[in-house]
Image: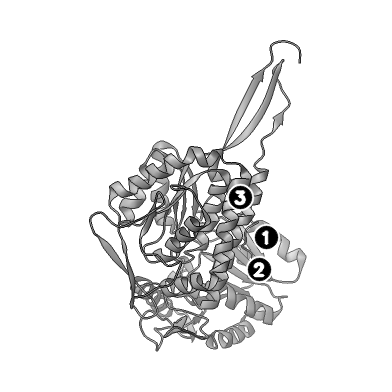
Amino acid sequence: MSHQYPFNSLCHVDGQWLDSRSGTRIAVHDPANQQLIDQVPLLDQDQIVAAVDAAQRAFPAWRRQSLDQRASLLRRWAELMLEHQEALARILSQEQGKPLAEARGEIAYAASFIPWFAEEARRLNGQTLPSHIPGAQLSTLKEPVGVCALLTPWNFPSAMITRKAAAALAAGCTVVVKPAHETPFSALALAQLAADAGFPAGVFNVVIGEPQMTMQTLVGDSRVRAVSFTGSTRVGKLVLQAAAQDVKKVALELGGNAPFIVCADADLELAVQVAVAAKFQTSGQDCCAANRILVQRPLYEAFLARFAEAVRALQVGPAMVEGNETAAQVGPLMHQGAFDATQARVEDALAKGARRLVGGEGHALGGWFFQPTVLAGVTPAMRIYQEENFAPIAGVMPFDTLEQAIALANDTEYGLAAYIVGNRLDVVHPLVRRLDHAMVAINGVKFTGHPIPFGGMKASGLGREGGSEGFEPFVETKYVCLHHHGQI
């Protein structure tokens, strides 16, 4: 197939485009129609090690560059992303399946992290400390940790790279990125643009290999001093165990099971609008997606009626048909396993007494398209309540008291995002304080972005990405005690 710049199908190591030495390649398919996009090499283990070699060689010179020099290269990278936003969005939609409008939004979102971290690095300040030691001067410095491994997922294949890489690179680290094998081309396009922006060889490397081998090789290499992973809690635990062997810094952004609480005083139309966006963006394949919609009894039936109507109106389809943009709002699921799991969760809920109001089965388009679905009367016994659904299926249940809502919202191992729709501050603020979730959105769906500390509590992860906290996995605090022998 022919592809336009900045599309690339080879790995990027030490400033060179690299094929697999063994010739092993993997096919990447469009989830909307299962057609072949292209193939990418699965690098051999020694080639993965070579990427760490390259990052290690590049690190001393990169950390010594002035902040202005690093910032200039980073800003140029972001400029190139925005100059080629449409091409990047089309690459993303083709390999990930999300509607083109969402893909364009992701590219802008991804680019926003880069200049922000480039500027925020100026505030990686140390301190001068009041001394408890006579004749000594005490201070701290912030220094880059070294080589960082960035392991990224398929649902946001551009933004999850730049949110990590911008912080690491601005702090003076070098990186090896391992994208999901389902969506490699967005990562490789970013590598092409980084090279064109003038990044020195070895500073930004992208490798694709057999997933388990690649993860173990990167995380197990003692020269890799920080690992940042976004993905499932199951795999995150494995990354944490592997990183513990030589005590690396670790940031984990893992699964979610977000509650969406609609209070009795909420504006009904606003509640429906926010719930649709919070549930069905990225076709529900989002760790922050509203997984359990809890509605206070006085609004329950009215909410169900309006919510079902709004979901029924959602347009399902591929991002493009024969190269032309469609009006799709919901795209396909990522693969057959996701489709099968979604169907099984719906069948489980119906068998245990849920009411199907909308959808509930594969879409007429076939393939991995699933109907946007609303199930009422969900209970804690159902898989749709217990598990992260990662699909366009919404489970709705009533509650009577705020105590019940809090108990239901916190009844999960996860603690990433939560949503509240309500107008009484004396209700909303106590809810916020008592929810065991690290990020809470009130009366709106948009809450992520470059200045905010994104991350989770409990099984949803460790550390934060974005905001000034986003530097923490990639820097060390060095303490200096200078003794003065004589008068100062």
* 405, 76: nearer the viewer: 76
Asked whether the beta carbons under mark 3 and mark 1 sit within 8 Å of each other, the answer is no
Q: Amino acid at mark 1?
A: Val
Q: Amino acid at mark 3?
A: Ala
Q: Residues within 10 Å of mark 2 (few under 14, many from 20)?
A: many
- The residue wearing badge 3 is 71
Asked whether the beta carbons under mark 1 and mark 2 sit within 8 Å of each other, the answer is yes
Name the side, left or right, on which 435 lies relative to 422: left
Q: Nearer the viewer, mark 3 or mark 1?
A: 3
Q: Amino acid at mark 2?
A: Ile
Chain-order first, disc 3 or disc 2: 3
Disc 3 to disc 2, C-alpha distance = 38 Å
- The residue wearing badge 1 is 432
Disc 3 to disc 1, C-alpha distance = 37 Å
Q: Secondary structure at mark 3?
A: helix
> Is residue 441 depicted above or below 478 in this figure?
below
Of all residues shown, which one is farthest toward the top? 486
Give the quadrant of the N terminus: bottom left
- The residue wearing badge 2 is 420
Q: Position of residue 286 (x, y in %)?
A: 50, 67
Residue at (37, 47) in percent of width and height? 51
Residue 409, can we see it? no
Residue 419 lies in quadrant: bottom right
Residue 185, can we see it? yes
Q: Secondary structure at mark 1?
A: helix
Q: Residues within 10 Å of mark 3 (few under 14, many from 20)?
A: many
Chain-order first, disc 3 or disc 1: 3
> Is residue 202 depicted above or below 296 in this figure?
above
Q: Secondary structure at mark 2?
A: strand
Chain-order first, disc 1 or disc 2: 2
> Is residue 257 depicted above or below 362 in this figure?
above
